[in-house]
Amino acid sequence: GRNTIQNFDYYIAFSFFRMTAIVQGVYKRHLQGNASSGNAKVYGDFADLFAHLGWGLCVKLIKRQGGGSLFSLSAKALQLKEKLLKFMDDHIYPNEKAFLEYTQSNPGKIPPLLTKLVEKAKEEGLWNLFLVGSEHGAGLTNLEYAPLCEIMGRSFIAPSVFNCNAPDTGNMEILEFYGSQKQKDEWLTPLLKGEIRSCFAMTEPDQASSDAMNISTIIQKVGDFYIINGKKWWTTGAADPRCKLIILMGLTDPDAHPYRRHSMILIPFETPGVKVLRNLTTFGYDDLPSGHCEIEFQNVRVPVENILMGEGKGFEIAQGRLGPGRIHHCMRLIGLSERCLELMVKRIHERSTFGQKIAKHGTIMEDVAKSRCEINQARLLIMDTAHQIDLLGNRAARGDIAAIKLVTARMACSVIDRAIQAHGGGGVCNDFFLAPAYVAARCIRLADGPDEVHAKSLAEIEYRAQREKLKKQSKL
């Protein structure tokens, strides 16, 4: 049968193109007046038909292998993509409004709707897709997961439904690749099942935390315990009533090498001395149920076995966490930008100004064209970076990782801003999804490091590369 023949469509397309060449030759002999058949003239129409049929099969084959992208996906990844797209249409988009209304009316509570959607996602095998290089994941590479992450990024509620939301994804990666077996059993297993949530405490209100070496929260070893004292803020996920674990980065040895001074430690959320001071808002949005909290740690005591990998490993773990995590952030922004561009195009075709559709105005057409170019450029850069991480690892791809973080959030802010402008007053209220979308994109320019830090890192990598190039040239 057809399903047992490898590359069946390829051979059929080749046959159509071959027939195109044959009948075109017959038609040419008709034009030259030396055809052997009186019906040779009609063969010209067949040439066009066969060519279109062959090309149609080629397009079908290309889409099956990844939608015409430079980066083709495996059959497994394509199947997950189709399932995810259908799940979004059937269950995510129709329930966004109800989810938002519940969280606004019931702060501090988890919408029952989320629990139902989570169960559906598990049933359909759309669970823990993010975890690359682990038996607990879906067996995808970073490159294969990236387009799935883009789809989830089109909705604020989708990542949580599939257990692919930050900061839990990064925390689960930390536990999987840096945690002890005891730490995995206690924390990773319930996180993978979606039974609990977690948060990541790094940024501090009293320090310029864009330079992570400034982090001053003290982790002091006293006997068989560590005592933690300090204050953190922008601790995403801490407002969630299901949050049971804090992964905290703090100072263990101020006299060590700068990159060996800090460590990461696991703190059960209910530990005495952990005090949530407030939930911070972003441009007035509370981002519940996960939220972003300011937390005070006063003489918080945890066992020594709660340290991750040992003292002085904080920066090493952080870099391992941030590589794939930035792929996730950036691809979600691609999805967010695509949705906002779609809303823009829909809006400008519905309304008229100065005697014509808004879509016909030259400045608007330029905005749409710019947005399409910028989204596509950013996506290709992210996909290439994901490919580099898969091939070479986080360290070798660190320049590319800095580049995508720098480029993508700026792109998203620009695209969403144009969509807001095209919507007029509607763009800055909550009627059209655009205002919270802009807030999310703008905040990413600070989350996981501000633009300036990524630009600095990328420039330093470029300087080193150019110096090495000059050294080699001088030896010739």
Image (cartoon, rainbow, N blue to C red):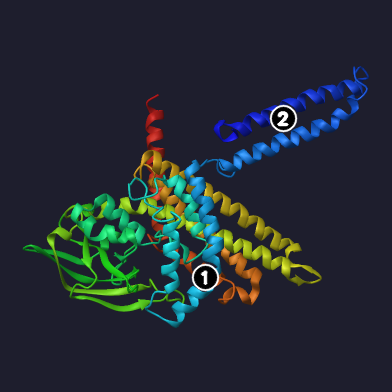
> Seen in the image, is 238 located left or right of residue 155?
left
Residue 396 on image: x %, y %: 36, 41
Is tag 1's residue or tag 2's residue first in the polypeptide sequence? 2
Q: Are there few (<14), some (14-19), or many (20+) residues within 10 Å of tag 2? A: many
Is residue 60 shown above or below 228? Answer: above
Mark 1: amino acid: Glu
Give the labeled residue for mark 1. Answer: 96
Give the labeled residue for mark 2. Answer: 16
Residue 223 seen in the figure: yes
Q: Nearer the viewer, mark 1 or mark 2?
A: 2
> Seen in the image, is 191 located left or right of residue 414?
left
Q: Secondary structure at mark 1?
A: helix
Residue 167 on image: x %, y %: 36, 62
> Seen in the image, is 395 located left or right of residue 26?
left
Is residue 239 shown above or below 305? Answer: below
Determine the residue positioned at 72% across, 69% down.
Answer: 350
Q: Secondary structure at mark 2?
A: helix
